[in-house]
Image (spheres, rainbow, N blue to C red):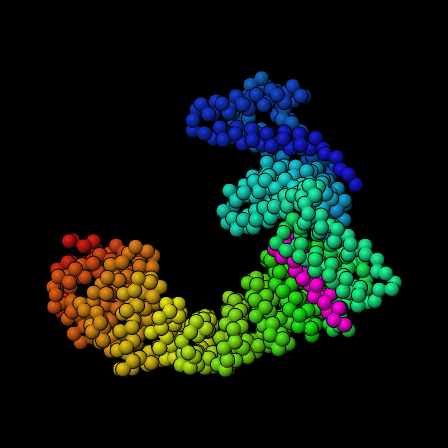
Amino acid sequence: MAFKKDPQEKKDLDDFLAKVDDLENIMKGFGSTDLTAQKAAFAKADEMIKKETTTGFNRTVINEKAFKDLGNEKNAGQEPAPLQFNSPSMSQDAFLSALEEDANARARARKIRQEKAKKVKEKANEAFHREDYESAHKLYTEAIGCCKDMTLLYTNRAMTRMKLGMYQEAIDDCDFALRIDETWAKAYVLKGNALRSMKKFDDAISAYRELATHHKNKEKMVDKYIRETESERDEVELEKLARKSLEQQDSRCNLVVKLVQALCNRVEPKCESREMTMSCNAATVKMLAGQLEDSLQAQVLFRQEGGFRMLSAKPALKAVLKQKSFATGSESDFARAMLILIRAACAKCPQNTTAFFQEPDSAEIMRNLLGSNDRQVKHAAVVCFFEFASDDKMIELVSQLFSVSWILSSLLHNDIAKLKLLTEAVATLSKYAENEKFRKESLPCFESTVLPLYHQFIDEIGHNQRKDLPLCVQNLCIFMKNDAIRKIVSANAPFLSSCLTCIEKIIQVFEPNQYREEMLSRMLDVTEYVMLHGCSATVDIAPKLTSCLLPALNWKGEVVVQKSLTTMVRCIERSKECVKCFDSSTGLHFVKKIYKLIASENAYLRTYGLKLICYVGQTRVSILRNVPKFDKKYQILRHALRRDATDVDLVNQGHAAVLFGFLSELPGGMDPLVDDLDVGSTLIKYLLELARFAKREHTKVNCTIAVGKMASNDARILAEVRRFDGINILSKNKPPGI
């Protein structure tokens, strides 16, 4: 059904909004303290009255009966009668009184119209939800007739018009809504969507960007719409190029079209055996797949020419693909060829993936082929699922068609490992797991189905050095980005015990090589995630894990050292018992290594090195007695305190200050500073400055506490603090009088 534009509707709205603006300006003028503005407002009011007089407005006295019948049912919702005056001039008070009465009457009438519009809107909403769009359109139009300045009515009708293919009319409705309220977000979105449907992609992007100017908090959503629009624009351009290439007799494009037609229209001779038929079709399919490789234009032409519909045209071929096992080698070869074609057609082309799954039985075919006991067919099916996951939208489409639990169980099935396809399967699963919604939907079956399989993989690490195991552990870490999954893993004591055993074997048994480095790095990712949650399982394992990781601090690879430091810090946060790992003999080597890290140019190593030794000093300050052996006059620590080039350096200032406070608790801990008066004085002066002027509040607090500890533990430091008026600085926040 076609609907005509109503020019009168646009004119009525324009007139209405203009009158609202004029009345608002007049009222502002009346209330102004500027006499010029007041006079201008009165002049504008007189002009409006004269204008109304020419259309039948009787400028005499206020007509007391003008609103007499307003409450009558027959006049309900109608505009009140116009104001009337019987004097050629009237006072300001009289005019304002008349204006107020008119405003009140109009407000009452407006309320009645709004209530009627809302009732009609509810009926329209019901019609829309039952997909009766023509009825919904009529009802929304009726509601707008009752109340022309309700933005929601225009955007609701715009949605309905889009369902009816009335894209320009939907844009007009959005423009109406934005004239009433220029910040109405829904109008910008619907306008952009309608413009996209009309292939006006640049205008659609402009509409989305205008939304971002009014709503800064919706920039992420706007970026998503813009990316989708740009993708659609690129696809349309690609379709034009593909068609142009075909018209220009491009050899590849011509061959794609001919091969698709050959597959769809081929008539098998009666004398031809089934095996020969399968072999001929497989050869043609493989040739076609080769033409689609790395050619978006060829992929687009394949879709436009109905390449995915070939199976519907050939029921016998489709029947072969619905099997899990194949009677002959030619059937297996054909099934593999079709999967190669599907992969080539869908690679980096989500439009083709969508088109494929719109074909009847396509999901059933993929389900059967992934469950095949033929290694080559299963491998080709796994690779297809890898290509299907080209973006979040496609991942969600596949998840809906097959269910997350089926995808997980199929890609992690024992047959996958037996057929040596685990690398491909886990790589595919990693793409799906990167999708936040997929991780969330995997939660119900994760503990019972998924985690036991990863537990099995980790147990295998200690017995062999399979190349696919690091990828398996990495995949687990992707799942652990979900907080609920992290909690499940953290609470599983047997799994954590296996992780500890695995790390011990990697450090103590494995030969130093790249595999050992990669495997330990992946396992440390797991333990770092695990230690983010405090529970009985993580508290129990934390001390053992800390002790196990001490040798890793001496590794040459910075990545492993960084991750070991991070995990040890997490362990101490879970259990202070971890500090017992640093006994008298270990403590010396520990402090030596940590000070090398604090002196490093690697900001990450400095930060976690300082953080770790602060945790240790807080619990067992005696371990810090070895610090002066490796840091003469605390030069490394003073340098860390002086760094302020980056945000990380500013954080480390607070850590360094805390460590000075702990060192002051040791007998003779301040001797390296006091023995050289210049060094000690400069340090105290700088700590006081930071206590007053540091850029981070935590640093101010830490420096204040550190100076207080140092002064209370050593009278010589106290004397220096007093010399710089430090007592007042610390107690009254007074700037240093230096």
Name the residue rendered at 62%, 37% in the picture.
175
Where's residue 195, x and y in %?
64, 41
Where's residue 668, x and y in %?
16, 74
| Residue 738 appears left or right of 79 | left
Residue 630 in view of the camera: yes
Where's residue 608, x and y in %?
34, 67
Compared to residue 64, the image places residue 325 above or below, namely below
Nearest to the observer: residue 107 or residue 464: 464
Nearest to the observer: residue 494 or residue 577: 494
Quarter of the image where the N terminus is located: top right
Q: Main secondary structure of the magenta part?
A: helix
Magenta span contains residue 348: yes
Nearest to the observer: residue 179 or residue 580: 580
| Residue 699 appears left or right of 685 | right
**Quadrant in the picture for residue 645:** bottom left
**Quadrant in the picture for residue 725:** bottom left
Where's residue 629, x and y in %?
20, 74
| Residue 247 appears left or right of 437 | right
